[in-house]
């Protein structure tokens, strides 16, 4: 683990404003994750070893979805000290991925639904239990898919403007975080089954791996539906508004969700292993 007292965060000033995309070296600029690697003294990369893969997936996507360097500096730079040394166990990473999924379903989605005046479905989505595991994710599926269908009917024309707004508001980032962790969990389960194949429990391990993979696939599918529904609702909201009012409504919604997404990253970073071993 890196010693936080020895990290030199003044190095961030040498990088200048955070940039979109990947870069060959700091001379070309840096995205938020490349900046983390630089400050942490790691080889230049947008996948620093010291950062949670779930948080990394979220921030790489959000970094590139934000429209300006100023937005990246304002929202992402303050998070850099908080996400160093966050890489943890599979159990912790899965917990973080469910936080991202829960935020996308119960915060991101109903915010756009309300802007599109689809209040009945927004109420139903907000009333869902927290998404913390495969059971709660599966239970949310019917409600999310119904919202997706309603939002799809409501929206049609303003795809580009609303899509940019939804991306800037971190919806795609949350989907990326949940999806990456789901794939990691499925690979880990498959690996566990392979290691167990030498013993008599090989069949049981394979079945367990299958159940875990199915659960994670369901979670990823629910997340995709939530993202699609949120995007459709954003399109509908853009279409329903007019002129300056449309821009103001979208900006207000984006600002609200961006602050909420910053809080989400802080909550994901704050999850640490139970010293007694309960999270392992």
Image (spheres, rainbow, N blue to C red):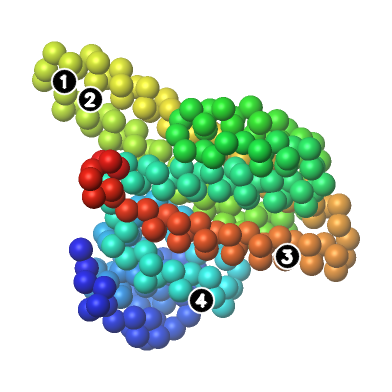
Q: Are marks 3 and 4 in contact (CB under 8 Å)?
A: no
Q: Which quadrant does the C terminus fall into?
A: top left
Residue beneath disc 1: 197
SS at mark 2 in the image: helix
Q: Specify the label residue 73 is tagged with.
A: 4
Residue beneath disc 3: 252
In the rendering, at what x and y percent does residue 214 appear? 42, 25
Q: In the current view of this chain or complex, which residue is farthest to the front?
A: 276
Label 3 to label 4, Cα distance in Å?
A: 19 Å
In the rendering, at what x and y percent does residue 222 appear? 56, 34
In front of the other: 156 or 218: 218
Would you call the spot at circle 4 few (<14 residues within 10 Å), some (14-19), or many (20 or more)? some
In the rendering, at what x and y percent does residue 185 appear? 34, 37
Of circles 3 and 4, which is in front?
Answer: 3
Label whose residue precedes the other's in the sequence (1 or 4):
4
On the question of residue 162 being in view, the answer is yes
Label 4 to label 2, Cα distance in Å?
A: 44 Å
Label 1 to label 2, Cα distance in Å?
A: 6 Å
Residue pictured at 48% horizontal, 80% vertical: 17
Residue beneath disc 2: 193
Would you call the spot at circle 2 few (<14 residues within 10 Å), some (14-19), or many (20 or more)? many
Q: Are marks 1 and 2 in contact (CB under 8 Å)?
A: yes
In the rendering, at what x and y percent does residue 201 appear? 18, 16
Residue 65 located left or right of residue 121:
left
SS at mark 3 in the image: helix
Residue pictured at 38% horizontal, 81% vertical: 12
Would you call the spot at circle 3 few (<14 residues within 10 Å), some (14-19), or many (20 or more)? few
Label whose residue precedes the other's in the sequence (3 or 1):
1
Would you call the spot at circle 1 few (<14 residues within 10 Å), some (14-19), or many (20 or more)? some
Above or below, 183 against 84 in this view is above
């Amino acid at each position: 683990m890196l010693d936080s007292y020895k990290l030199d965060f003044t190095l961030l000033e040498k990088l200048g404003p955070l940039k979109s995309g990947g870069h060959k070296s700091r001379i070309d600029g840096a995205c938020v994750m490349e900046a983390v690697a630089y400050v942490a003294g790691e080889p230049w990369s947008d996948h620093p070893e010291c950062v949670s893969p779930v948080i990394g997936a979220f921030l790489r996507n959000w970094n590139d979805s934000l429209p300006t360097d100023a937005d990246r500096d304002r929202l992402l730079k303050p998070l850099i000290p908080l996400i160093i040394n966050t890489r943890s166990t599979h159990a912790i990473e899965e917990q973080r991925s469910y936080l991202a999924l829960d935020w996308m379903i119960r915060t991101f989605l109903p915010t756009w639904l309300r802007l599109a005046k689809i209040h009945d479905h927004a109420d139903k989505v907000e009333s869902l239990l927290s998404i913390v595991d495969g059971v709660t994710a599966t239970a949310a599926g019917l409600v999310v898919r119904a919202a997706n269908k309603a939002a799809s009917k409501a929206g049609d024309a303003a795809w580009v403007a609303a899509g940019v707004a939804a991306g800037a508001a971190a919806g795609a980032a949350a989907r990326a975080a949940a999806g990456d962790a789901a794939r990691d969990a499925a690979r880990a389960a498959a690996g566990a089954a392979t290691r167990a194949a030498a013993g008599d429990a090989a069949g049981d391990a394979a079945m367990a791996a299958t159940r875990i993979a199915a659960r994670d696939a369901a979670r990823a599918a629910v997340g995709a539906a939530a993202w699609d529904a949120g995007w459709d609702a954003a399109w509908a909201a853009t279409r329903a508004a007019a002129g300056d009012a449309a821009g103001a409504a979208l900006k207000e919604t984006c600002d609200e969700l961006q602050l909420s997404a910053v809080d989400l990253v802080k909550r994901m970073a704050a999850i640490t292993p139970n010293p007694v071993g309960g999270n392992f």
